[in-house]
Image (cartoon, helix red, strand yellow):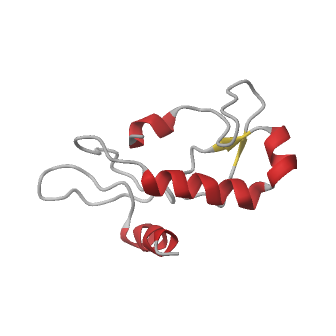
Amino acid sequence: MRLGDLRVTQCVSCGRSEPPLFKLPDALNQSVRACPACLARYGAAALAREADEVLARAEPGRSVTLGRCLHCGERVVARADGAYPAWCTSCHGDLIRLTQG
């Protein structure tokens, strides 16, 4: 899965795209949503953890030119090749800790 595919608004668990969908504030990717049924069944913490694991496995496209951190929204500095990293330094550290277990 590519990072761009994560912009689709749908439930992180079941894939439902019909409203209502609710944000998962603890997820690194702030565009992640969950439907009421999955929130009741799994809980927000488990769904946020699953969303973070999907994000950790996602592959960037040729260049990620977002200009803002996917988690906190802070501005990020362009790399030498002109592309922008997906996360600021602080949030990238959180992602590294998540993927290391």
| In-image side of 22 versus 80 (left or right) | right
- Asked where in the image residue 28 lies, by quadrant, the reply is bottom right
Q: Could you tell me which residue is drawn at 57 percent across and 50 percent down?
A: 30
Determine the residue located farthest toward the right in the rendered image. 40
| In-image side of 24 versus 3 (left or right) | right
Q: Could you tell me which residue is drawn at 18 percent across and 58 percent down?
A: 79
Task: Residue 32: give x, y in percent of width and height.
Answer: 60, 45
Task: Residue 67: give x, y in percent of width and height.
Answer: 33, 49
Closer-to-camera residue (101/49): 101
Q: Could you tell me which residue is drawn at 70 percent across and 53 percent down?
A: 47
Determine the residue located farthest toward the top in the rendered image. 18
The quadrant in which the N terminus is found is: top left
Task: Residue 92: give x, y in percent of width and height.
Answer: 41, 67
Task: Residue 43: give x, y in percent of width and height.
Answer: 81, 55
Closer-to-camera residue (10/81): 10
Closer-to-camera residue (32/99): 99
Q: Could you tell me which residue is drawn at 27 percent across and 52 percent down?
A: 84
- Asked where in the image residue 75 lies, by quadrant, the reply is bottom left
Looking at the rendered structure, the number of numbered marks drawn on it comes to 0
